[in-house]
Amino acid sequence: MTATDGGDRGLDGGKQVKGRERHTATDTLGLLLALVVTGARVDDARAAPAVLRQLPAEKYPRPRLPWAD
C-alpha cells in the first residue's frame, strides 16, 4: 500500500464511489507528514500502518495521541 502511478483504483462499497483514497498524517498545525494513496476499497484501518511507517522514526518514534476519522 504505497503511492501508485495511477493504476490502482477500487470501489468503496459503503459510499459506492470508484477511485482512489488518500490516507494522511499531519501535525497539530495540519502540516503534511505522511501520505499513502490506495484504491477506494482499502479500509482506513488497513492503510493506517502504512501511513505510520512513512513517519521518520527518529523524529516520531511513537505518536502520542493519534486521531482517526
Image: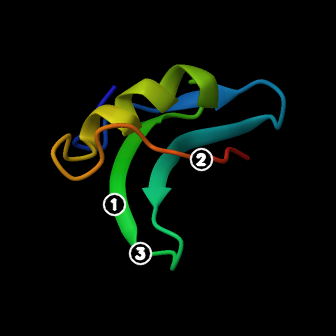
Q: Residue 65 carries which label?
A: 2
- Return the residue at label 3: 31
**Image marks 1 and 3: residues in contact by CB distance under 8 Å:** yes
State the image coordinates of residue 33 (x, y, percent, origin top left).
33, 60
At label 1, the amino acid type is Leu
Q: Front-most of 52 and 23? A: 52
Where residue 64 appears, x then y in whole percent?
52, 45
Task: Tell me the SS state at disc 3.
Answer: loop
Give residue 42's quadrant in the image.
top right
On the image, the x and y values in percent for residue 61 come to: 29, 39
- Residue 29 in percent (x, y) is at 51, 80
Label 3 crowd bin: few (<14), some (14–19), many (20+), radius 10 Å: few
Camera-side mark, 2 or 3? 2
Query: Disc 1 marks which residue?
Result: 33
Q: How far apart are marks 2 and 3 (CA)?
A: 16 Å
Left or right: residue 7 compared with residue 45: left
User: Visible in this render: residue 52?
Assistant: yes
If you read the primary sequence from the N terminus, does the residue marked by circle 2 or circle 3 appear first? 3
Q: How many other residues sit within 10 Å of disc 1, few (<14), some (14-19) or many (≥20)?
A: some
